[in-house]
Image (cartoon, rainbow, N blue to C red):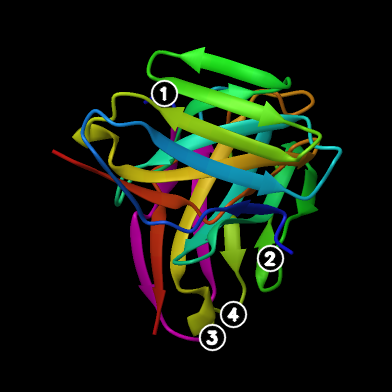
Amino acid sequence: QKEVEQNSGPLSVPEGAIASLNCTYSDRGSQSFFWYRQYSGKSPELIMSIYSNGDKEDGRFTAQLNKASQYVSLLIRDSQPSDSATYLCAVNVNNNDMRFGAGTRLTVKP
Amino acid sequence: DAGITQSPRYKITETGRQVTLMCHQTWSHSYMFWYRQDLGHGLRLIYYSAAADITDKGEVPDGYVVSRSKTENFPLTLESATRSQTSVYFCASSDSTGGNTEAFFGQGTRLTVV
């Protein structure tokens, strides 16, 4: 089992819809969780971090964390074509040993 | 320039050759990382460093060597390059205790081993 798993995608949603991205992790001791966005040919950039159970909202983005279920998700409301990218879930599994999922490619169609 | 920079951006090398990828950051971040990114695998951690002269193995360290004599530099060396090491390599840094801060990534180095 991989330490961090994401739904494989690709995911396609129409403009204005909600995009839902999911991630599960195997290490129950993990405390820090991150969502990165990566445009094609570019480096990853952080869009959300979450450390406590529940929801964390930042503009059109909401991260949700459930440590009991070892599950973290990212919701993108009012999706825009500029949101089309690969989204990477990252989990800090051992202090600063950060592990990434394989990524989910999102396409937002105008 | 401020930030984290990698060099070279592109590199083609032959099987068996030694090659070094450079990473330099100007923030004085304590932590630095090397990842490789391959289709279907996402980012996989090769090595990381918590401070100068302290390095640790990640998921896929075999065939790679790192050093960190200065806080700002974290070079990655492929001692004898193999075709399976063809990949995009990302260096990252973070100023963190306990892992609660984001990692900032360099632009990446696309390495092709022929």
Q: Say which label, 1 or 4, has the lower sequence index.
A: 1
Q: Which residue occupies the foreground of this view, B89 or A45?
A: A45
Residue for badge 2: B60
Kindly indicate the quadrant of the structure image that contains residue B46.
bottom right
- Describe the element under mark 3 as helix, strand or loop: loop
The question of residue B22 being in magenta is answered with yes
Q: Would you say the residues marked 3 and 2 are in contact, meaning their CB atoms lie under 8 Å apart?
A: no
Q: What amino acid is found at the position of numbered circle 4 in the picture?
A: Ser
Q: Amino acid at mark 1?
A: Ala
B65 vs B96: above or below: below
> Same chain for the residues at labels 1 and 4, yes or no?
yes
In primary-sequence order, the first of circles 3 and 1 is: 1
Q: Which residue is mark 1?
A: B2
Q: Residue A36, how many percent across, how many down?
A: 48, 36
Mark 2 or 1, closer to the camera: 2
- Report x, y in % for residue A8: 48, 59
Chain to which mark 1 belongs: B
Closer to viewer: mark 3 or mark 2: 2
Q: Are marks 4 and 3 in contact (CB under 8 Å)?
A: yes
Q: Which residues are magenta?
A: B4-24
Structural crowding at the residue carrying mark 4, measured as other residues with C-alpha within 10 Å and reported as few (<14), some (14–19) or many (≥20): some
Residue topped by disc 3:
B16
Which numbered disc, 4 or 2, marks the residue that appears first in the sequence?
2
